[in-house]
Image: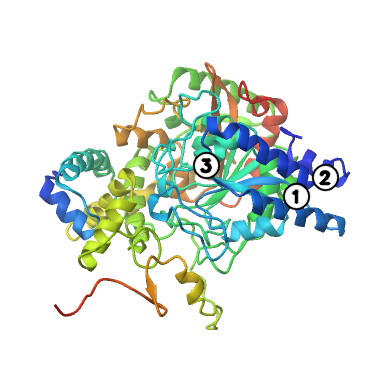
Amino acid sequence: MQGKSLKELAAALAAGETDSASLTEAALKRIEARDGELNSFVTVAGEAARGAARAADERRAGGESGPLAGIPMAQKDLFCTQGVTTTAGSRMLEKFVSPYDATVVARLREAGAVMVGKTNMDEFAMGSSNETSYFGPVKNPWDPERVPGGSSGGSAAAVAARLVPYATGTDTGGSIRQPAALAGITGLKPTYGRVSRYGIVAFASSLDQAGTLTVSAEDAAYVLAAIAGFDPRDSTSAEQPVPDYPALLGESVRGKRVGIPKEFLDEGVEPGVRETFRKAADELAGLGCEVEETTLPNLKLSVPTYYVVAPAEASSNLARYDGVRFGHRAADPKDLTDLYERSRGEGFGAEVKRRILIGTFVLSHGYYDAYYLRAQQVRQLIADDFRRAFEQYDFLVGPTTPTAAFRIGEKTADPVSMYLNDIFTIGVNLAGLPAVSVPMGFDGKLPVGMQVIGRAFDEAGILSLAHQYQQATDWHRRVPEGWEE
Amino acid sequence: MAFDSSAVSRLAHLARIGVDEKTASSLGSELEHILAMVDQLREADVAGVAPMAHPLELTQRMRPDEVTESPERDSYQENAPRVQDGVYVVPKVLGG
């Protein structure tokens, strides 16, 4: 059953050709046998998974069914899961067991999904390579010397290696789309507010959004249908109707206007990536789309804007880790300040400390106007660029990343060069828009992705374009060598 | 923006993050490097631009003023490093 689409798995389960217990056992066995090569899981929850599989099989025997019922999957270790550790990739939360489920987790559980474990990630989702994880880097199944991207690097590697059919992720500046691109799979970041943030360990609350890492856009439609929708427990959850995403995948894209912002093809883009993208854009024209060049003039300021806004919000969100109520606590504190400072000094890794300090600085007295306020103004300019572009175009497309997967260790010494890997993904978070990355070919032996950006709440539109591109191409079906069986 | 070790230590104290002397010095040059990149924001013409308050033009929702959660102190405190009789234990704050 490995390598089958969610639709095929659901059909096989419905026809009684397999059951959830067998699918779950096979996934657990494959993770046990092969994940040592990748390190994509922080926790494998075998016992809980077997219980959930039995329950799913019983529900099916009782006449219940559903597109995700009984199918194994993995949760990024940023989603709180009752009874299973949620580490956020940090020493700070190494032993944290949430007393409740995140809304995404609860909705998938309700849909009969079988969680086999929690995937590795950059610490508190701060990173683009999965190298900031306290639990060690994840390897890219396309080349074990390279990163799978981040922060949802474990989810991306696990899906690319066909350890699980799908996994969840979160995306604050590209953390779903960038690893999806680097691992040769499909990654969907919905509109800000589309999927509940309740129970997701907070990083930057005005940017964070949960989404999916899947083989195909079709699979993403099924998972999004299960997790999207209003949640009273998230104060920024959008009260918007949720369309039937799988049913809308076939909507015609003929005559749709597609803009290619020229900033997505500037000199920082590897020639191989640019060339691959040109062919992908030709495919879109072949599907009947009207493709032309456009511009997002302020996009180049998205990385500096992000590195003010996101650290500012992070410095506030991560103030909760005080060594008192939960999380790491330093031994033998001499007073309360010493308890705070040493617990946080020991519990956080280098990248998280850098970002908290940047955030503290930009919010501090005397610097607030020059940095934070100005960044929020530039953020508005960037959002206005997108708004203007969407008056003319239905979709904006470009390469998801300027390069294919880089080597482990290649960018760790220079945080800014790491940050610049997200240059094409960050603007979408700043503007709160939905976007999906789909495999569009290879630069050498490494997969690269095309990003399709849509209007707010038009996940159905971007998924239909992605799906029809995937009907015309087979890049998303390619499996890394050594992982086919 | 220049960050010597004492500037880093002040900032780290504001953020309640313990850093030793050696880390403070390397952190200083990293922060300078990051803020030099951030300084590109000065290029933007932001005259008359209202700072963004929310990525989508949605208003914050009100909810009925009703009790929706019950106290679950015991289960929440299972994650606490030190509790005693239902309260969190910290080093002495008052007195000598």
Per the image, label 2 sits on a secondary structure element best described as helix
Chain letter behind tag 1: A
The answer to whether residue A289 is left or right of residue A193 is right
Q: Work out whether mark 1 precedes mark 3 in sequence or the reverse, and give the earlier one.
A: 1
Above or below, A331 against B63 in this view is above
State the separation of the CA atoms marked 3 and 2. 29 Å
Q: Name the residue under label 2.
A: A13
Task: Looking at the picture, tell me which residue is in the foreground, A108 or A34.
Answer: A34
- Cβ–Cβ under 8 Å for marks 1 and 2: yes
x, y percent for residue A256 = 65, 37
Marks 1 and 2 share the same chain: yes
Give residue B48's position: percent from left, percent from top: 30, 55
Amino acid type at image mark 1: Gly
Q: Which chain does tag 2 point to?
A: A
* Residue topped by disc 1: A70
Q: Which mark's residue is nearer the viewer, 1 or 3? A: 1
Q: Distance between the residues labelled 1 and 3?
A: 24 Å
Quadrant where the C terminus of chain B sits is bottom left
Residue B44 figure quarter = top left
Write down the chain letter for disc 3. A
Marker disc for residue A176: 3
Mark 3: secondary structure: loop
